């Protein structure tokens, strides 16, 4: 009962262990008491003191049999209900509704446990997990659950089968890290989720200088065990970490583990670590790329962490280009395409970026970030059908992970397929009914689809969210406008949004309040100061009117864009 019930409530692992210990301790005591004593109407008596014809053992035995049978029946009913009803929330769907078959070549890489006393190797364990995940994601015919999806199970004692069902994968990799002054002891095991069978397991008890080889060997052995289509030697070459410096690689892993924390101070620290890795090994392409990613954030005004640096736009752009060029110079051929595509995008060479990213996708069809880039770039140019093609491709490899579902919903909205966005949102909410990111995206999609009553139900759930920051208020403002409660929408804007720092949220609010002129004034400085990549970050909004910005129009004309007329927000206030 404990092993079945406790994981549902996310009880700590020690609670199940405690129950087992109690059973072990209690069993001999119960056995001795049952042998030496008998329960009578007058209480417990020694068995030798009870006459056979006075014994009520047959009666109590029948009662116990009845209780045991009833308890076992309830347990069976509970297990059946758990399998049928709880499992329904993890069923995946394709775009037309049928249940998706789980690909046998699919895997989730769970965060490795830090078994060091004091937990001082957590950063290393997280970084190692991400590197293995990223290496496996490069294998063309292997579907890998995203980092966001896998890391939600960090420090949680949940059954492997349940995790695999939720993420829509056939296999799970788990492991642990322990370190001494000179060595790492790393264990890894590949588990087939359907029956818990260990396809492969290995313990690496080796010097710290061997960490790069260990990471590559784990990824290679997993890909080989799952019988991917790649030639083994080609796979080995592809999985190379890109550095032979153990110190640089360790700095990079620590930076990688901090980059997604969401904390601004931690984000700054991750950048410092990437910079240290670059200095230790100037040929380490991934360290250059990750450092460039920091400056990419600084150039994107609607992204969390974009206001850390007080440098000028031109300085940020120069710092980004210096690092991405170093990444390109030292990268393997396929990775070079990805880096060049990002550089072309930031420098607003949109057609060039699409061409490079398309070539990269042919080599790495399961790279979610790159598919998302292709969706956005085609939306920038107004080529919505092409954007929708890439979004459908993304949907096909979304597995059951939250981050991919969020991207797919957004992709349908940006591609102006509002009906499909609404349809997919319903499925996403059914699968992830409590995920606030999914609820936020689904709420917006349903409003664009004209389903205001459905959206209102989701808005009521979002009203108590603690995870969305200012987006909580933009959702409330959207719903108020959809319900023609303009005064309420204005109150939300004045009380919760005006004083906030997110320029993207302010811009959206002004468009919703039908304040197009104010919205134009808000972002006009990007145009006047030639901060055109920052301005371009708003191009994916269907209602963004690029015609008001001549310099942006010149770029779009050069890139042969087909954006057409901007779309009015159908649920805006004052409509």
Image: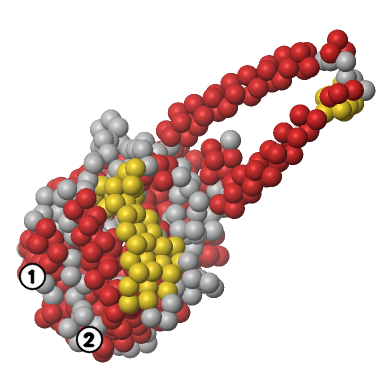
Q: Nearer the viewer, residue 523 or 405?
A: 405
Q: Residue furthest right?
A: 42
The residue drawn where x is 54% and y is 58% is 466
Count the numbered circles shown: 2
Where the N terminus falls, by quadrant? top right
Q: Is residue 553 above or below residue 481?
A: below
Q: How is the image coloured?
A: secondary structure
Report the residue at 44% width, 62% height from top.
113
State left or right for residue 455 relative to residue 495: left
**Front-most of 496 and 227?**
227
Res 243 visible: yes
State the image quarter where residue 314 is shown: bottom left
The answer to whether the residue labelled 2 contacts the one labelled 1, judged by CB atoms less than 8 Å apart, is no
Location of residue 194 with respect to 314 vertically, above or below: above
Q: Which residue is mark 2?
A: 281
The 10 Å Cα crowd at callout 1, few under 14, some 14 to 19, many 20 or more, is: few
Distance, label 2 to label 1, CA atoms, is 19 Å
**Disc 2 versus disc 1: nearer the observer:** 2
**Is residue 289 in view from this perspective?**
no
Choose the circle earlier in sequence order: 2 or 1: 2
The spot of residue 388 in percent (x, y) is 18, 48
x and y, in percent, of residue 430 in the image = 41, 38
Q: Position of residue 538 (x, y in %)?
A: 27, 65
Q: Which residue is mark 1?
A: 333
């Amino acid at each position: 009962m404990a092993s079945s019930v406790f994981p549902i409530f996310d009880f700590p692992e020690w609670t199940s262990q405690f129950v087992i210990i109690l059973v072990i301790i209690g069993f001999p005591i119960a056995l001795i008491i049952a042998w030496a004593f008998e329960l009578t109407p007058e209480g417990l008596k020694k068995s030798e003191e009870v006459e056979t014809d006075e014994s009520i053992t047959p009666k109590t035995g029948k009662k116990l049999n009845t209780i045991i049978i009833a308890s076992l029946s309830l347990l069976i009913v509970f297990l059946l209900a758990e399998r049928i009803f709880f499992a329904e929330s993890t069923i995946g769907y394709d775009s037309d509704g049928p249940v998706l078959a789980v690909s046998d070549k699919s895997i989730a890489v769970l965060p490795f446990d830090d078994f060091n006393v004091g937990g001082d190797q957590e950063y290393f364990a997280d970084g190692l997990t991400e590197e293995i995940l990223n290496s496996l994601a490069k294998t063309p015919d292997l579907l890998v659950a995203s980092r966001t999806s896998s890391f939600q199970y960090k420090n949680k004692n949940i059954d492997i089968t349940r995790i695999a069902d939720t993420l829509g994968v056939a296999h799970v990799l788990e492991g642990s890290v322990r370190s001494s002054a000179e060595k790492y002891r790393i264990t890894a095991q590949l588990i087939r989720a359907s029956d818990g069978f260990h396809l492969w397991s290995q313990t690496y008890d080796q010097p710290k200088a061997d960490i790069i080889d260990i990471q590559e060997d784990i990824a290679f052995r997993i890909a080989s065990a799952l019988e991917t289509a790649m030639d083994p030697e080609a796979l080995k070459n592809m999985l190379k970490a890109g550095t032979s410096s153990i110190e640089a690689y360790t700095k990079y892993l620590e930076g990688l583990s901090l980059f997604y924390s969401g904390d601004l101070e931690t984000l700054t620290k991750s950048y410092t670590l990437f910079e240290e890795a670059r200095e230790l090994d100037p040929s380490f392409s991934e360290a250059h790329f990750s450092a460039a990613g920091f400056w990419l954030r600084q150039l994107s005004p609607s992204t969390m962490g974009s206001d850390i640096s007080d440098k000028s736009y031109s300085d940020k752009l120069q710092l980004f280009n210096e690092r991405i060029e170093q990444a390109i110079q030292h990268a393997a051929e396929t990775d070079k395409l990805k880096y060049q595509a990002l550089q072309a995008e930031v420098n607003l060479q949109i057609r060039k970026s699409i061409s490079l990213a398309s070539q990269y996708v042919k080599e790495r069809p399961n790279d979610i970030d790159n598919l998302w880039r292709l969706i956005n770039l085609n939306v920038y140019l107004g080529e919505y059908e092409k954007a929708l093609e890439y979004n459908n491709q993304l949907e096909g490899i979304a597995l059951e992970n939250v981050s991919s579902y969020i991207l797919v919903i957004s992709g349908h909205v940006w591609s102006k397929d509002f009906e499909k966005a609404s349809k997919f949102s319903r499925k996403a909410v059914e699968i992830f009914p409590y995920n606030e990111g999914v609820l936020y995206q689904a709420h917006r999609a349903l409003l664009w689809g004209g389903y205001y009553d459905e959206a209102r139900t989701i808005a009521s759930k979002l009203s108590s969210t603690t995870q969305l920051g200012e987006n909580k208020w933009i959702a409330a403002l959207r719903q108020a406008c959809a319900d023609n409660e303009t005064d309420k929408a204005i109150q939300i804007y004045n009380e919760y949004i005006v004083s906030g720092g997110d320029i993207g949220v302010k811009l959206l609010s002004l468009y919703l309040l039908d304040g197009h002129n104010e919205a134009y004034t808000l972002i006009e400085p990007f145009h006047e100061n030639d901060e055109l990549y920052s301005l371009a970050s708003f191009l994916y909004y269907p209602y963004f009117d690029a015609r008001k910005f001549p310099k942006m129009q010149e770029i779009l004309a050069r890139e042969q864009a087909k954006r057409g007329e901007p779309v009015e927000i159908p649920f805006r206030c004052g409509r």
